[in-house]
Amino acid sequence: MATVALTEENFESTIADNDIVLVDFWAEWCGPCKSFAPTFEQSSAQHEDVVHAKVDTEDQQRLAAEFGIRSIPTIMAFRENVLVFSQPGALPASSLEQLVTQVKALDMDDVRAQIAAHESEHQAG
């Protein structure tokens, strides 16, 4: 599966309509972004059940600002509409493969329970 370009118009629906979405925040002028691109493309070919999407931070500045992108590339993973991973820096292929495997293996009921517990702690304190 080829990567999908995300914009303000399709970001939320792409995240909501797919089980797992990996997002690569990048820019044309960014050397590490260009170096990481083939690794990301290869992962998209290997994992057709995972949406691999890219946000051009130059073209989609409001979207990058909304997610607090300060360094690129930044990789984010969403599972069942929940942000479960976010890290700046290009990942080697083995680390990206490990990330995909870990995101697929997540127990989302447990993740939601942890989020709920964390939110109730903050509301009580």
Image: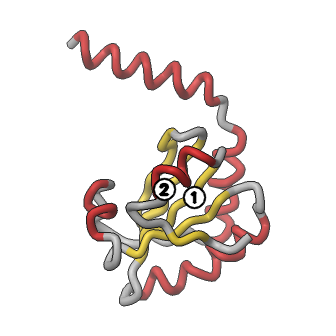
**Residue 105 location (% of width, % of height):** 71, 39
Q: What's the residue type where badge 2 is placed?
A: Met
**Residue 80 location (% of width, % of height):** 59, 39
- Where, by quadrant of the figure, is residue 120 drawn? top left
- Label 1, residues with CA under 10 Å away: few <14, some 14-19, many ≥20: many
Task: Name, please, the residue furthest toward the front.
Answer: 9
The quadrant the N terminus occupies is bottom right
Residue 122, above or below 37: above
- Label 2, residues with CA under 10 Å away: few <14, some 14-19, many ≥20: some
Earlier along the polypeptide chain: callout 1 or callout 2? Answer: 1
- Where, by quadrant of the figure, is residue 4 drawn? bottom right
**Residue 31 location (% of width, % of height):** 42, 88
The quadrant the C terminus occupies is top left
Q: Are marks 1 and 2 in contact (CB under 8 Å)?
A: yes
Name which residue lies at 67% across and 54% down. Answer: 100
Name which residue lies at 49% across and 48% down. Answer: 85
Residue 67, above or below 72: above
Q: Circle 1 is placed at which residue position?
A: 22
**Residue 48 location (% of width, % of height):** 77, 62
Q: How many marks?
A: 2
Q: Secondary structure at mark 1?
A: strand
Q: What's the residue type where badge 1 is placed?
A: Leu
Q: Determine whether, in the image, residue 46 is placed left or right of residue 116.
A: right
Q: Which mark is residue 76?
A: 2
Q: Secondary structure at mark 2?
A: strand
Residue nearer the viewer, 20 or 71: 20
